[in-house]
Amino acid sequence: MFEELLNLENLSKRQAKKVAAITKKFSENSVANLETAETLMFDFLCESNDYAFNIVLDVLTKIEFKGNFNRWQFIEPAYTIKYYLSKDEAEKQAIRTMLTQKVRSKLDTDEDRKIYLDKVRNGLLLDMTLEHYEEYEPENRTEKFDFAISKLTDYLHILAIGATGKISEEECLEQIKTNLQLARELYKK
């Protein structure tokens, strides 16, 4: 899966260590492995290493939702990024359908799911992210980078499930560009 990444010469020591670890023993059932893959995906996205980014994105987007939200939190951002980057309307629709209809608790009724999606489209997760970072003002580069990535993933999620609430598609796209640019600037420092 990740073997191709081992041959890359431009990996940082931290990235090389993470790649070696997940190449040696990767399990889609391991939250630690998924978190490592997600971290690498954002690293490669922020340094514009398209080749490495696409390898990780491809692996993560082959993993299906199996009812475990602890695992899914590290997989879903890959699907939302794939949605954002895709030019294929059928692929985008398949991702949106999966995120809105298949990724759900077995206990959710259709009405519960609709209410939840409406809340997300209206910025519920984004508001929680903003609240968290207002409470704990990011002080260093790492915290500011994490904040930019959190906002980026929130806007990507809203876009992928259909920006039909108080946050428009245009605003999502603008915020995605802004937060991706900020994350890239912070990543380089």
Image (spheres, rainbow, N blue to C red):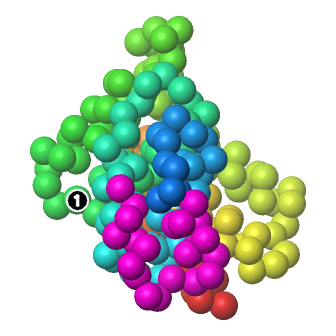
Q: Quadrant of the C terminus?
A: bottom right
Lateral position of residue 82 relative to residue 189, left or right:
left
Q: Is residue 93 above or below residue 65?
A: below
Q: In this view, does 189 lie above or below 172?
A: below
Q: Main secondary structure of the magenta part?
A: helix
Name which residue lies at 17% across and 61% down: 87
> Nearest the camera: 126 or 37?
37
Q: Picture coordinates of residue 151 (x, y %)?
A: 59, 60
Q: Give the range drawn in magenta.
A: 1-21
Q: Picture coordinates of residue 16 (x, y %)?
A: 55, 75
Q: Which amino acid does label 1 sit on?
A: Ser
The residue to which callout 1 is attached is 86
Furthest residue in direction front, as rendered = 24
Name which residue lies at 34% across and 24% down: 101
> Nearest the camera: 22 or 58?
22
Q: In this view, does 184 lie above or below 105?
A: below
Residue 12 lies within the magenta run: yes
Residue 48 lies within the magenta run: no
Q: Picture coordinates of residue 166 (x, y %)?
A: 48, 45
Tell me which corner region of the image, top left, top right, bottom left or bottom right, holds residue 150.
bottom right
Q: Is residue 32 above or below residue 114?
A: below
Asked if residue 173 can be seen in this view, the reply is no
Q: What element carries label 1?
A: loop
Asked if residue 24 can be seen in this view, the reply is yes
Name which residue lies at 22% across and 38% down: 94
Q: Picture coordinates of residue 177 (x, y %)?
A: 43, 73
Graded by Cα atoms within 10 Å as few (under 14), some (14 to 19) or many (20 or more), the crowding at tag 1 reads few
